Amino acid sequence: MLAPPPRTRDGTARSPGPFGRLRRLVTPAAKERALQALAATPFRPAWWAHSGIQQTLAAMRAQHAPPPLRAETWPTADGDSVRVHFVDVESPRAPIVLVLHGLEGSRDSSYVRTAAALAAARGWRFGVLEFRSCGGVLNRARRTYHSGETTDLDLVVRTLGERFPGAPLLPLGYSLGGNVLLKWLGEQGDRAPSHVLAAAAVSPPFDLGVCSRQCDQRYGGAIARHFLRTLIPKARQKHAQHPGSFDLEALRGCRTFARFDDVVTAPTHGFRDGAHYYATQSCGPFLPAIRRPVLLLAAVDDPLCRPEILPHAAVAASPFLLAQFPRGGGHVGFVDGGAPWRPRRWAEAQALRFFAGQLATTG
């Protein structure tokens, strides 16, 4: 049973504030209603992209031309900066969809473009946080970004709350960005800023160690090599900028994520080694502490993950976590139609439907 609303000294009901309204979203009945609403639009893979790898590759093509984005550069406490790109709307209280991109992604990633177009069509404000060193700009600090680095997200969330008071914030994370988002929500727990109404994560790596091995081993290591093609040159630039930050000679032998994280990620960001990084920065252990409604979208056939790491138990135990784990969909794929050269993406539309339902509940 929900607690009665707080009252003033004269006995009249006091406004519960944003967090008080959120309590309506996390009863078992509310969770079941939200799941039933989401079940009305299940994922059905396009006939021409049935396997996980087909879904993953097909989704890299963008269906939507995004609305014009306006860039802002925000200083950080360590003397560096982050860039946030916006699609503006007139109403200062319009809901804000904030996207966190995946590994080596940017504002130009296909899922970012699709989410921007769909948010703008609803009249919502849209923003995308480009992690440090992404989007073609090398940051100044020694560190860049990684799967569990949450201080920049915290800065952006709190700054948006100050700039747009009364506007609900709806973060949406993809892959690495989903891990960052879920870890941050778990770190915050009950202290999460009240303007964060709900969140969604698409294909987050619930266990970084498992996902690293998948990328290193599947398809002859092609997944890891795809990302290392940009990560290694960027690491060389960072070493030139901050000599001695890691072993440059060892970088030349990096052919896997495991090796790269041992050689670069760990020493650059203060971890003992790659295993320490994976064990402490995976979002899976943080899920039980989340205290905002969160939709998890992940596919059983995700080639970057393993089905056994999908957090069924955590979802069942928490009133805050909702999940759709379809058999197909690949990694940040979920292509449910369109043509091979112009695919239609399901996850973005589903996440925004979830957000709309949460907004309606708090109205």
Image (cartoon, rainbow, N blue to C red):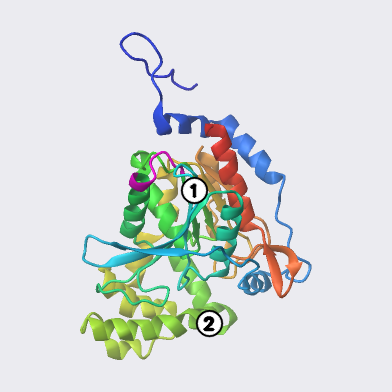
Question: Magenta segment range?
Answer: 162-168
Residue 163 magenta: yes
Q: In the rendered view, would you say 97 is above or below 23?
A: below
Secondary structure under the numbered disc 1 in the rendered image: loop
Q: Residue furthest top?
A: 10
* Mark with earlier residue (2, 1): 1
Residue 105 magenta: no
The tally of labels here is 2
What's the residue type where badge 1 is placed?
A: Glu
Secondary structure under the numbered disc 2 in the rendered image: helix
How far is mark 2 from mark 1, CA to CA? 47 Å
x then y, percent, for residue 90? 49, 48
x then y, percent, for residue 208? 44, 65
- Residue displayed at 26% across by 61% down: 76
| Residue ID for mark 1 | 90
The reply to whether residue 220 is in sight is yes
In this picture, residue 7 sits left or right of residue 123: left
What's the residue type where badge 2 is placed?
A: Gly
| Residue ID for mark 2 | 221
The 10 Å Cα crowd at callout 1, few under 14, some 14 to 19, many 20 or more, is few
Quadrant in which residue 354 is drawn: top right
In this picture, residue 59 sits left or right of residue 207: right
Q: In the rendered view, would you say 146 is above or below 6?
A: below
- Residue displayed at 41% across by 38% down: 166
Question: Viewer-nearest of labels 2 and 1?
Answer: 1
Towards the viewer: 355 or 88? 88
x then y, percent, for residue 237? 31, 85
- Residue displayed at 36% across by 91% down: 252
